[in-house]
C-alpha cells in the first residue's frame, strides 16, 4: 500500500493547536514556486537539494493548480470521479511536485515549525532533502518540526501533492475537485519558553452580567486584558463583573495577550455562553434564530484560494442582507474568516472536513464512516478542527461533517469532541436518530414537516428512548431552500414557522455562492465545461450571489424574509416588532414616503421608541391629505441604520413595508379615452382602398387583413400583425417558460421534474387552430384552439379586441379542454416588436423581478431600465426578469414609444430573444439579440419553488390548468 493510500491521517505532523497571532518570528513562504505536473506518481529524486528544476514552470503558492492551466477542474456533487475501492485510488493520479528555494537569515535561531494551512488532498514534505512527513485532511492545518533540518542561508523545500488519496474518500463534498497547496505556507519560530497552545474559556452569566475567564496555556503564562484591568496566570479563573457579552448582533471583543518570557500571543476574546435549555438553543440566556447560509470557499479566478479582501467582502454582503449565521459547508474555512466573523458578528456552525456522499449511491456499502481502518483519520480531522478554532466566540456549534451516513467513526468523533469541549453543542444531520448529537437537524424538510417538528409531532423513531431524546432537542435546518438560478420560492413561509414555533431555530440556506469559474474570455464555466468524464452540470450554480459576489434576485428575498424588525401598517399607525435576538431599536431610524402613481409627493421621519428584543410597539403616522382623483397612493415605511457600522453606512435599510393608502378605483391606464371609438377597415388582398365604417364593423371577407383602430390583424388567423405601423408577431397563448434550474429537478425519485412533464405535455410546442374570426358589435372576436401533438389536452382561447382611441384593448378568456395532467408554467401572451426599442419604464413591482412565491422584496413604484439590464444574467439561461403587478409599461427608443397596460395589472417580461431561444441556451453568450423585442404579458404564473430540495411548491403558487380571463391594452 502506498503512503497516499494509507487510510490513516499521515505521519510526522505535530499535535494540533490553536491558530493565534504571535510575535514569534514568522517567514511567509508564499510566492512563486517551481512546479511540475505528472499524470501519475513517479519517483525521480526531485526532493534532493541539488535536483535541477530549471525547466519546470512557475506556480504561485497558494494556488489550485488547475486554475493556472495545469490539468483541469472537475465538478461532481455525489459521484467519486474514480473507482470506489477504499482506500485505493487509480494509478492515473495527477501529482504536482513543488519546489521552493528560500533564504533564512543568520539571526533566525532555535526551534521552528513549518505550517501548511491547506493542501488538497495529500502532501509529502521534504526540507533540505530530509523527509518531514505526510499530511492528509485538505482543509486543515499541518505543522512539521523542522528544527533539526532548517539552516541559515539557502534551504530547499520540496512538496509532492497528490490529487487522489485515501483522504479523498472523506472529502466528497459538493464542489470542484481542485488540488494544490491552496492556503498559506509559513515558517514559524517556536521559542523554547514560548506559548505552545492557548485555550480561552470566556463565559457570560446573563443573570448577573458577569464574565468568567480562564485561559489554558503553558505553566507560568500571564493573561492580560488591559481594558478590563485583568491580569491572571494561565489556568486561573477570574470573575469579571459588568462585561459586555459577545453576540452576532453586538460582537463585543476584548483585546488580550498571553505572555511568556519568549513569546506574546494576541487574542480577541468574546464573553458568551451557549446552552440548550428546555429544548431551546440559547446564547447568553436568549433563544437565537439562525438566519444562515451554507458557505463554500471559492474564488472564480483562484479556485480554493480566497484572498482576505474577498473574505471580508463576502461577510459585508451577508450582513447587509440580514444574514447572521454561517455553516462552514463542509469543512473548516480559512481561519481568517472566523476572525472576521468574531469581529463583524456571525453565529458559526464549524463543520469538519468529512463527507462520504458517494457511498449513498452504493447504499452506503463500504462507507469509511463505519470502516475501522478510517477511525484514526476521522478522529484526526475532528481534533484538528476543534483545536484550531476553539478560541473563536463566533463558533457556537461543532458539526461532525456532512452526508457521511452513519457509523462508529462518527460516534467516536462525537465522543472525543464532547469530552474535549462540552461548552458547544454537537451537530450532524446524517443520523436521524440524533444518538450522538445535541441538535435535531434536517436538510430540505418541507414546510409541512417543519411545522410538524415545531409542534414536536414529527414521525416517531422506533426506539422510544431515542425518540424522546430527539423530540426534546432544538431543531435547525442545516440546509433548506436550495438556491440555483431563478429561485427558490417560499422563504417567507419558512420564516413564519421559525417565529411560530420556539423549537424551530432557523437554518442555513443552500448556498451562499455560485461556483462558476471565470474563463479568459470573461464567461463562466460550470460542470461539464472542462470535458469531465463525470459531472453534475449546473448543480454547482446554486448560490445567492454570482461568483463575483453580485447579489442574485433571491438575495433581496432573503433580506426581506430575514428582516430583524417587522413593520406593518395598521390603520393610522406603524406596528414595529423587534425580532432581533439581542438588540433593541436604538440603532435604527424610521422613515416614510408617500408616492402617487410611483411619484414621491411627501416624506418624513417617525420617532422610533426603544423597543427591546422580542417586544413590539406602534407609532402613529402623520395625517395625510387625500390623493388626487384617479391616482394610486402608496406609503412606504423603512427602518434604516441611524449611524455607521463596520458593515454598512448610516441610512442602510434593514426593513421596509408598503401599504396602499386608498383603494385603486381608477382605470389601470389613466388619462386614456375609454369611450368606444372602434374603427374597422378590411384591407382587400388586391390592395384597393375601402372606406372605414366608424362605429360598426365591416363585414369580413375570406383572406383579407382587418384593421381595428391602430391595429392590423390577419383575416385568417385573427392575430395582430401590425400596430401603429410597427410589424408585430403575435403568439396568442403562452403556457410554457424557459425551464429554471428548479424546474429541471426533483428530490422525489417517483416524480418527474416539471421540465420533463411540460415537455411530455408539449407546452413548448403548442399549435394553434383558428376556430373563428368575426365582428361582434364594436369588437373583433377571435377564437383559437391551442394544443400540442399527441395529446387531447387543449385550451380554448377567445380574444375580444376593441379600439380605444389610438390604443387596442383586449379581453382574453382561456378555457381548458380535455384532460390536463400537468401544471402550466404561465398563462400569457407574447408580442414580437421591432428591435429599435432600448428602454422600458413601468409602474408596478420592482425594481427587481417578482414571481408568485418570490416577490416579498419587490415594492410598488415607478422604475426605468434598459431592456438589456432588465434581464437577469443567470450563468445558465432560464426564465427570469418578470416584473409583477405592472399597471402600465412603456417601451422607448429609436423605434418610438409604445405603451402597454394591464387591467388591473399583469406580469411583464421584455427580452431580445424568444422563450425558445432562452430555453435552448446553455450559457449567456449563446443568447444573441435578434431584430425583435419580445414582450410577454402574463396573467398567471407558476411559482419558482424549490423542488431541488424536496420542498413541494406551496398550493397557492402551483398553477394548475384553469379557466381565466384577463385584459390588457397597447398602443
Image (tube, helix red, strand yellow):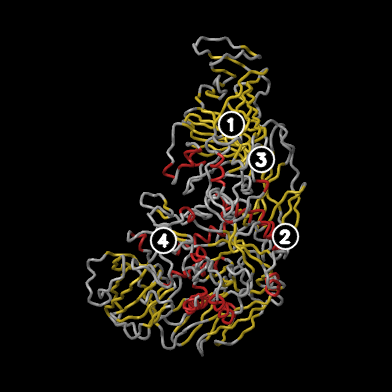
For label 3, the SS is: strand
Q: How many tags in the picture?
A: 4
Q: Are marks 4 and 1 in contact (CB under 8 Å)?
A: no
User: What's the distance in space between the residues labelled 3 and 2, CA to CA?
Assistant: 34 Å
Relative to 28, residue 313 above or below: above
Q: Is residue 799 visible?
A: yes
- Residue 758's label in the rendered image is none
> Do the CB atoms of the residues marked 2 and 4 lie less than 8 Å apart?
no
Number of other residues with Cα within 10 Å of mark 2, as a class: few under 14, some 14 to 19, many 20 or more: few
- The circle on residue 786 is 1
**Residue farthest toward the right in the current orientation of the protein:** 571
Q: Quadrant of the image for the N terminus?
A: bottom left
Left/right placement of residue 433 relative to residue 353 reads: right
Picture coordinates of residue 526, whole percent (x, y): 43, 53
Element assignment for label 4: loop
Task: Bin the neighbour count of mark 1 within 10 Å (Cα to Cα): few under 14, some 14-19, many 20 and up.
Answer: many
Marks 4 and 1, how far apart at CA: 49 Å
With 55 as the anchor, is 590 left or right in this view? right
Residue 18 visible within the image:
no
User: Distance of mark 3 from mark 4, alpha carbons?
Assistant: 47 Å
Instruction: Determine which residue is flagged by label 4.
Output: 303
- Mark 3 vs mark 1, foreground winner is 1
* N-terminal label among 3 and 1: 3
Q: Nearer the viewer, mark 4 or mark 1?
A: 1
The answer to whether the residues at label 1 and label 2 have Cβ atoms under 8 Å apart is no
Instruction: Report which residue position mark 3 lands on.
Output: 595
Mark in the foreground, 3 or 4: 4
Question: Can you identify the residue that label 2 sits on?
Answer: 500
Q: Residue at x 50, y 71 (%)?
A: 367
Amino acid at each position: 500500500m502506498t503512503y497516499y493510500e494509507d487510510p490513516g491521517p499521515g505521519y510526522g505532523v505535530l499535535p494540533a493547536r490553536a491558530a493565534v497571532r504571535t510575535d514569534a518570528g514568522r517567514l511567509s513562504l508564499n510566492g512563486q514556486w517551481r512546479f511540475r505536473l505528472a499524470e501519475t506518481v513517479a519517483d525521480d529524486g526531485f526532493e534532493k537539494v541539488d535536483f535541477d528544476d530549471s525547466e519546470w514552470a512557475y506556480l504561485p503558492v497558494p494556488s489550485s493548480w488547475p486554475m493556472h492551466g495545469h490539468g483541469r477542474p472537475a465538478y461532481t456533487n455525489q459521484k467519486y470521479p474514480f473507482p470506489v475501492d477504499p482506500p485505493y485510488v487509480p494509478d492515473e493520479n495527477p501529482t504536482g511536485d513543488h519546489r521552493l528555494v528560500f533564504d533564512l537569515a543568520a539571526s533566525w535561531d532555535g526551534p521552528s515549525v513549518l505550517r501548511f494551512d491547506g493542501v488538497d488532498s495529500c502532501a509529502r514534505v521534504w526540507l533540505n532533502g530530509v523527509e518531514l512527513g505526510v499530511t492528509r485532511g485538505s482543509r486543515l492545518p499541518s505543522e512539521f518540526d523542522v528544527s533539526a533540518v532548517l539552516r541559515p542561508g539557502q534551504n530547499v523545500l520540496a512538496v509532492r501533492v497528490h490529487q487522489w488519496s485515501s483522504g479523498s474518500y472523506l472529502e466528497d463534498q459538493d464542489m470542484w475537485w481542485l488540488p494544490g497547496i491552496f492556503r498559506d505556507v509559513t515558517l514559524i519560530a517556536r521559542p523554547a519558553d514560548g506559548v505552545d497552545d492557548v485555550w480561552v474559556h470566556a463565559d457570560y452569566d446573563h443573570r448577573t452580567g458577569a464574565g468568567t475567564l480562564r485561559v489554558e496555556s503553558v505553566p507560568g503564562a500571564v493573561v492580560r486584558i488591559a481594558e478590563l484591568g485583568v491580569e491572571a496566570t494561565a489556568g486561573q479563573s477570574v470573575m469579571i463583573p459588568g462585561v459586555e457579552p459577545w453576540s452576532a448582533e453586538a460582537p463585543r471583543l476584548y483585546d488580550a495577550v498571553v505572555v511568556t518570557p519568549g513569546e506574546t500571543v494576541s487574542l480577541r476574546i468574546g464573553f458568551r455562553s451557549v446552552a440548550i435549555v428546555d429544548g431551546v438553543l440559547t446564547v447568553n440566556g436568549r433563544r437565537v434564530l439562525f438566519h444562515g447560509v451554507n458557505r463554500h470557499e471559492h474564488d472564480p479566478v483562484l479556485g480554493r484560494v480566497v484572498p482576505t479582501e474577498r473574505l471580508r467582502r463576502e461577510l459585508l454582503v451577508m450582513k447587509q442582507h440580514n444574514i447572521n449565521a454561517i455553516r462552514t459547508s463542509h469543512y473548516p474555512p480559512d481561519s481568517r474568516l472566523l476572525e472576521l466573523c468574531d469581529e463583524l458578528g456571525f453565529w458559526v456552525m464549524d463543520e469538519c472536513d468529512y463527507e462520504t456522499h458517494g457511498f449513498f449511491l452504493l447504499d452506503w456499502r463500504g462507507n469509511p464512516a463505519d470502516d475501522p481502518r478510517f477511525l484514526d483519520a476521522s478522529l484526526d480531522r475532528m481534533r484538528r478542527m476543534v483545536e484550531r478554532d476553539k478560541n473563536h466566540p463566533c463558533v457556537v456549534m461543532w458539526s461532525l461533517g456532512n452526508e457521511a451516513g452513519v457509523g462508529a467513526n462518527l460516534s467516536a468523533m462525537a465522543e472525543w469532541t464532547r469530552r474535549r469541549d462540552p461548552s458547544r453543542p454537537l451537530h450532524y444531520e446524517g443520523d436521524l436518530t440524533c444518538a450522538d448529537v445535541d441538535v435535531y437537524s434536517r436538510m430540505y424538510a418541507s414546510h409541512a414537516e417543519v411545522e410538524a417538528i415545531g409542534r414536536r409531532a414529527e414521525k416517531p423513531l422506533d426506539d422510544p428512548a431515542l425518540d424522546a431524546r430527539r423530540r426534546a432537542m432544538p431543531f435547525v435546518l442545516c440546509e433548506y431552500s436550495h438556491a440555483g438560478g431563478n429561485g427558490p420560492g417560499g422563504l417567507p413561509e419558512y420564516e413564519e414557522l421559525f417565529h411560530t414555533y420556539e423549537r424551530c431555530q432557523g437554518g442555513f440556506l443552500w448556498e451562499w455562492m455560485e461556483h462558476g469559474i471565470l474563463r479568459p474570455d470573461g464567461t463562466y464555466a460550470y460542470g461539464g465545461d472542462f470535458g469531465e468524464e463525470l459531472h453534475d452540470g449546473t448543480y454547482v450554480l446554486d448560490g445567492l450571489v454570482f461568483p463575483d459576489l453580485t447579489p442574485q434576485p433571491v438575495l433581496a428575498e432573503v433580506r426581506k424574509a430575514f428582516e430583524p424588525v417587522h413593520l406593518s401598517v395598521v390603520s393610522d399607525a406603524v406596528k414595529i416588532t423587534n425580532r432581533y435576538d439581542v438588540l433593541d431599536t436604538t440603532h435604527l431610524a424610521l422613515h416614510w414616503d408617500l408616492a402617487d402613481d410611483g411619484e414621491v409627493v411627501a416624506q418624513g421621519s417617525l420617532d422610533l421608541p426603544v423597543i427591546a428584543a422580542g417586544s413590539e410597539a406602534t407609532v402613529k403616522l402623520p395625517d395625510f391629505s387625500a390623493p388626487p382623483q384617479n391616482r394610486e397612493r402608496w406609503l412606504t415605511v423603512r427602518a434604516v441604520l441611524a449611524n455607521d457600522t463596520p458593515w454598512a453606512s448610516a441610512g442602510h435599510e434593514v426593513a421596509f413595508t408598503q401599504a396602499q393608502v386608498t383603494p385603486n378605483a381608477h382605470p389601470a391606464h389613466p388619462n386614456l379615452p375609454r369611450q368606444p371609438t372602434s374603427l374597422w377597415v378590411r384591407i382587400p388582398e388586391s390592395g384597393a382602398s375601402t372606406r372605414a365604417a366608424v362605429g360598426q364593423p365591416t363585414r369580413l371577407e375570406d383572406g383579407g387583413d382587418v384593421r381595428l383602430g391602430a391595429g392590423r390583424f390577419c383575416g385568417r388567423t385573427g392575430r395582430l400583425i401590425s400596430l401603429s405601423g410597427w410589424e408585430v408577431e403575435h403568439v396568442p397563448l403562452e403556457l410554457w417558460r424557459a425551464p429554471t434550474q428548479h424546474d429541471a429537478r426533483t428530490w422525489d425519485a417517483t416524480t418527474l421534474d416539471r421540465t420533463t412533464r411540460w415537455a411530455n405535455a408539449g407546452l413548448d410546442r403548442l399549435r394553434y387552430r383558428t376556430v373563428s374570426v368575426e365582428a361582434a358589435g364594436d369588437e373583433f372576436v377571435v377564437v383559437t384552439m391551442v394544443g400540442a401533438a399527441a395529446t387531447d389536452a387543449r385550451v380554448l382561447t377567445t380574444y375580444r379586441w376593441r379600439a380605444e382611441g389610438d390604443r387596442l384593448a383586449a379581453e382574453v378568456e382561456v378555457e381548458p379542454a380535455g384532460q390536463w395532467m400537468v401544471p402550466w408554467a404561465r398563462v400569457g401572451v407574447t408580442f414580437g416588436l421591432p428591435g429599435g426599442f432600448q428602454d422600458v419604464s413601468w409602474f408596478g413591482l420592482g425594481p427587481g423581478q417578482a414571481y408568485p412565491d418570490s416577490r416579498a422584496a419587490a415594492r410598488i413604484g415607478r422604475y426605468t431600465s434598459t431592456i438589456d439590464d432588465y434581464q437577469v444574467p443567470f450563468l445558465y439561461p432560464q426564465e427570469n426578469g418578470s416584473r409583477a403587478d405592472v399597471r402600465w409599461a412603456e417601451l422607448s427608443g429609436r423605434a418610438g414609444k409604445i405603451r402597454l397596460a394591464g387591467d388591473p395589472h399583469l406580469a411583464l417580461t421584455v427580452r431580445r430573444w424568444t422563450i425558445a431561444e432562452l430555453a435552448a441556451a446553455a450559457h449567456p453568450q449563446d443568447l444573441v439579440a435578434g431584430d425583435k423585442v419580445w414582450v410577454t404579458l402574463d396573467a398567471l404564473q407558476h411559482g419558482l419553488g424549490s423542488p431541488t430540495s424536496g420542498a413541494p411548491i406551496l398550493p397557492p403558487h402551483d398553477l394548475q390548468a384553469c379557466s381565466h380571463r384577463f385584459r390588457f391594452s397597447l398602443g
